[in-house]
């Protein structure tokens, strides 16, 4: 049916029906009331969103006026010596997020494939539930687990082994000037972030893989394809846009995660980490850790400006994700 | 002929031109075949099928003759689809689905373990009820099986794709949009694309599981016409719930009821002079 026909049906169909079925007076106010109610709720969300952005801008204005663009180009955050720089935190955010995504996306993808295609449904249910429960664990618990389990393990076993081997001379691995043993580091924080975003990406990826029509898969097998070929050449293409969307959702969470990262990343506010084993900081954890120490109005305003930066970054990624998903839906399955 | 009433090449655009499918027993019917003299491509003997503990097919015997169209008819849920889904062992994708008996294809019982299922499925192409283009371009859809089963140069591949599309009566409609997604085509075109994809790999048999039930009458007419030309090179088995369709396109018809083959014979005989009371009741619409 063409869109014109659909439109006509939408316009003429229900209205004619409504005119004929006039006697249901008691119900006449139901729809308008419902419409107003939903409108109000929708507006509230939008208003909250814009108010939040407005407050962030308003409160960070003193810092923006005072510091200007140097806020983004200055490396270190050291209010006591008059240095308000977001760069080390931005670098730390980028690095931890990249580590988390590099680990979590392929792993989530493999788990999702396992759950949808390879293991019997009963096993898939058990594994799927376990993965989903990961999502329900409060982030502070991941922080504590990282602190008591992962940090000693990294510092005692992984880091000495890696830095002692031939890998130890590669860029991003060779310990930098701020190296403190590697326990509290970008890598540790990134690993925990990976575990934290894994369930979201897995669940979303599994759902898009489940949406691949049965008949399309059967047609693939009907062409004499193996399971692997059907997965790679058909299901994956079908689900590609959703998989990317899932990665963006994980990315958004990894960017903003605060407590677990604040525990583990090392709290190095002065330098851009030059290695994954160096300590660092992220925008979110810097805000959390530095608020208690903020003395002057400028200190607080600069921290709020940090918040504004984080807000802007997550917004940009959200918009990109939405645009990608829209485009992917339009050309669904198009790319050859 | 059905096809002459189709004026417009775009499926569905002129749905009104075809008022009702003509009920005629096609002239192409192989009425003077000597059934026993014809080569059987597939011989089914004592086929039983189980969904878990529930038996869906009982002792099916049927012979599928080379370069003939065999129709499988019967009421919903009688096992028509289940029956042809054993031919390429596609049922195996699901747990608890089990077939026993004999399906002799090319001299071998394909139900025994050790059958090369991938090659079997290449040689027994399948068209599904719902058009099932893959999420890729028109060209890549047709090239899918070719890339999988053959080593071809780029130009050979392009030739074989064009050839398959021509033989599926789709080339003229898609030759300028080979790079567009397969799902951008109309439903009828998608189904012919699936036929092109299927015949590109040169199967012996084309299994069609209600290929026209999800598309409009004009597109259906085209597919029926296509079957007529395809049977020169292929053996076709079609499951259909549309008796007129079976009468139009097939040479032989098997009537299924509750998992059993009630009657199997030349289509003309099944429709004009059925031997069994149940067949007659179904044909004349006393139950459906």
Image (spheres, helix red, strand yellow):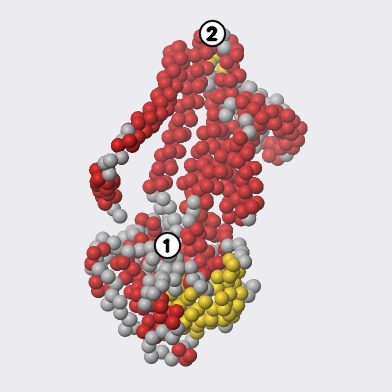
Q: Secondary structure at mark 1?
A: loop
On residue B130, which mark appears? 1
- Which residue is at 41% across, 62% downward? B131
Left or right position of B251 against B148: left
- Which residue is at 38% across, 32% downward? A38
On residue B196, which mark appears? none
Residue A202: where, in percent of width, then height? 57, 44
| Between B104 and B21, the one nearer to me in the picture | B21
Asked whether the residues under marks 2 and 1 belong to the same chain, the reply is no
Classify the position of the N terminus of chain B by image quarter: bottom left
Classify the position of the C terminus of chain B by image quarter: bottom left
- Which residue is at 49% across, 54% downward? A212
| Between A170 and B161, the one nearer to me in the picture | B161
Residue A108: where, in percent of width, then height? 59, 44
Left or right position of A292 against B8: right
Disc 1: CA contacts within 10 A as few (<14), some (14-19) or many (>=20): some
Please give the residue where the numbered disc 2 appears in the rendered image: A296
Label 2 chain ID? A
Left or right position of B27 against B263: left
Query: Which label sits in the foreground, 2 or 1?
Result: 1
């Amino acid at each position: 049916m063409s869109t014109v026909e659909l439109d006509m049906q939408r316009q003429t169909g229900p209205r004619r029906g409504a005119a004929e079925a006039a006697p249901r007076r008691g119900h006449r106010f139901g729809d308008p009331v419902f419409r107003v109610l939903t409108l109000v709720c929708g507006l509230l969300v939008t208003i909250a969103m814009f108010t939040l952005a407005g407050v962030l801008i308003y409160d960070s204005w003193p810092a923006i006026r005072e510091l200007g663009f140097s806020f983004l180009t200055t490396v270190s955050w050291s209010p006591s010596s008059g240095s308000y720089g977001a760069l080390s935190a931005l670098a730390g955010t980028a690095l931890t997020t990249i580590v988390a995504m590099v680990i979590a996306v392929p792993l989530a993808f493999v788990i999702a494939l396992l759950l949808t295609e390879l293991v019997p449904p009963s096993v898939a249910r058990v594994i799927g539930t376990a993965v989903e429960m990961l999502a329900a664990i409060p982030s502070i618990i991941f922080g504590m687990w990282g602190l008591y389990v992962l940090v000693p393990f990294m510092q005692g076993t992984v880091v000495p082994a890696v830095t002692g081997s031939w890998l130890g001379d590669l860029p991003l691995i060779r310990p930098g000037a701020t190296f403190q043993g590697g326990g509290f580091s970008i890598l540790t924080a990134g690993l925990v972030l990976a575990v934290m975003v894994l369930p979201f990406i897995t669940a979303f990826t599994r759902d898009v893989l489940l949406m691949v029509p049965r008949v399309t898969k059967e047609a693939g097998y009907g062409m004499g394809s193996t399971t692997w070929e059907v997965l790679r050449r058909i299901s994956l293409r079908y689900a590609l846009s959703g998989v990317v969307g899932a990665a963006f959702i994980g990315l958004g969470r990894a960017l903003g995660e605060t407590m677990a990262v604040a525990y583990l990343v090392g709290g190095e506010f002065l330098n851009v980490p030059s290695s994954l084993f160096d300590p660092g900081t992220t925008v979110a954890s810097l805000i959390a850790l530095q608020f208690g120490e903020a003395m002057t109005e400028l200190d607080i305003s600069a921290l709020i400006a940090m918040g504004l930066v984080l807000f802007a970054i997550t917004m940009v990624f959200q918009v990109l994700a939405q645009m990608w998903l829209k485009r992917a839906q339009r050309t669904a399955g198009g790319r050859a | 002929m059905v096809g002459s009433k189709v004026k417009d090449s775009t499926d569905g655009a002129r749905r009104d031109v075809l008022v009702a499918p003509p009920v005629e027993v096609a002239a192409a019917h192989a009425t003077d075949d000597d059934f026993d003299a014809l080569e059987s491509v597939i011989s089914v003997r004592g086929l039983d099928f189980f969904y878990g503990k529930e038996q869906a097919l009982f002792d099916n015997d049927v012979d599928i003759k080379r370069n003939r169209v065999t129709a499988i008819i019967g009421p919903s849920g009688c096992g028509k689809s289940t029956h042809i889904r054993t031919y390429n062992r596609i049922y195996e994708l699901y747990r608890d689905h089990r077939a026993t008996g004999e399906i002799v294809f090319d001299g071998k019982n394909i139900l025994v373990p050790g059958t090369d299922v991938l090659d079997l499925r290449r040689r027994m192409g399948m068209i599904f009820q719902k058009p099932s283009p893959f999420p890729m371009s028109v060209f890549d859809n047709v090239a899918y099986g070719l890339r999988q089963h053959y080593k071809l140069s780029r130009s050979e591949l392009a030739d074989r794709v064009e050839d398959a599309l021509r033989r599926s009566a789709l080339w003229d409609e898609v030759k300028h949009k080979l790079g567009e997604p397969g799902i951008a085509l109309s439903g009828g075109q998608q189904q012919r694309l699936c036929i092109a994809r299927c015949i590109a790999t040169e199967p012996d048999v084309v299994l069609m599981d209600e290929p026209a039930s999800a598309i409009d009458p004009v597109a259906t007419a085209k597919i029926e016409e296509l079957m007529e030309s395809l049977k020169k090179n292929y053996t076709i088995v079609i499951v259909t719930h549309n008796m007129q369709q079976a009468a139009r396109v097939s040479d032989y018809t098997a009537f299924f009821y509750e998992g059993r083959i009630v009657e199997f014979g030349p289509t003309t005989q099944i429709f004009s002079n059925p031997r069994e009371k149940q067949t007659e009741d179904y044909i004349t619409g006393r139950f459906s």
